[in-house]
Amino acid sequence: MPSAFREERLPELHAAIETIAFASLVSTTSTGLQVSHIPLLLAAEEGPYGTLYGHVARANAHAACHGAPSLAMFLGPHAYISAGWYPGKQTHGKEVPTWNYIAIHAHGTLETFDDAVALRQLLARLTHRHERAMPTPWHLDDAPADYIDRNLKAITGLRLPIDRLEGKWKLSQNRTDADRTGVLAGLEALGDEASRRMASAVRDANGEPSSPPTKR
């Protein structure tokens, strides 16, 4: 990994995991790779790099992956970067497109659990995490107790103690100031939410001030 893109600061990695929240979980099994796309919660205080928690349906093959070497991949903002945004395109033409992105890879050995108390606590934490921004947050206790109990019997908990954590922030750090100015102008001209998020990430990664608010 180019050193310009390597992110090793644990608080930054944890903050990105908590913000992205949704991961692709890949486990190595005797029959090949098992992949699930699920929300994962970070317990930052558990272990040197933290521990991830989630759940799958018992019918999901991941429910039988206890002890499997695993990787949780979190993908943050990403965007296509046109070669036409670099000043060099107009002068020497020796430019090619690329893709900017933020990605975190959390490696570990997967553990599974089906204790009802632990599963209920996990579901409560998950719903709190994702309902807290709602005008009227939904709580686990809003549903009938017997209904929740039946659902608990249909899922398996996942625990991934992180033993290696990698972060890649590929955000034009290896380009000149003029190139980054062109990238930012190109992203802002597109005007969509993904492009705005990428422009903000590029500024943050390169210590550049935020764009001034648009005049109306």
Image (tube, rainbow, N blue to C red):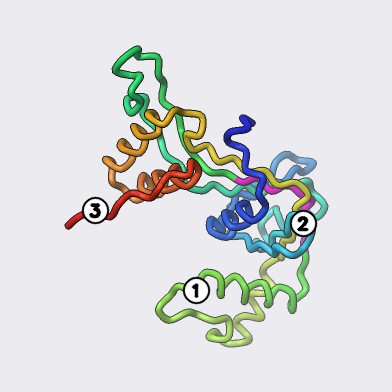
How far is the residue under mark 1 from the one under mark 2?
25 Å
Magenta extent: 104-112
Vertical order, 75 against 52 (above or below): above
Q: Name the residue under label 2.
A: 161
On the rendered image, what quadrant is the N terminus found in? top right
Q: Residues within 10 Å of mark 2 (few under 14, many from 20)?
A: many
Give the side of residue 122 with respect to residue 47, left or right. left
Residue 176 placement: quadrant: top left
Indicate yes or no whether the magenta region holds residue 107.
yes
Mark 1 falls on what kind of element? helix
Vertical order, 93 against 105 (above or below): above
Q: Nearer the viewer, mark 1 or mark 3?
A: 3
Question: Label 1 sits on what residue type?
Answer: Glu
Give the percent coordinates (x, y) of residue 166. Answer: 67, 43
Question: Label 2 sits on what residue type?
Answer: Pro
Decide whether the magenta segment is chiefly helix, strand or loop: strand
Q: Mark 3 points at which residue?
A: 214
Q: Which residue is drawn at 50% across and 43% down?
A: 205
The numbered dot on residue 13 is none
Indicate yes or no whether the magenta region holds residue 88.
no
Residue 141 placement: quadrant: bottom right
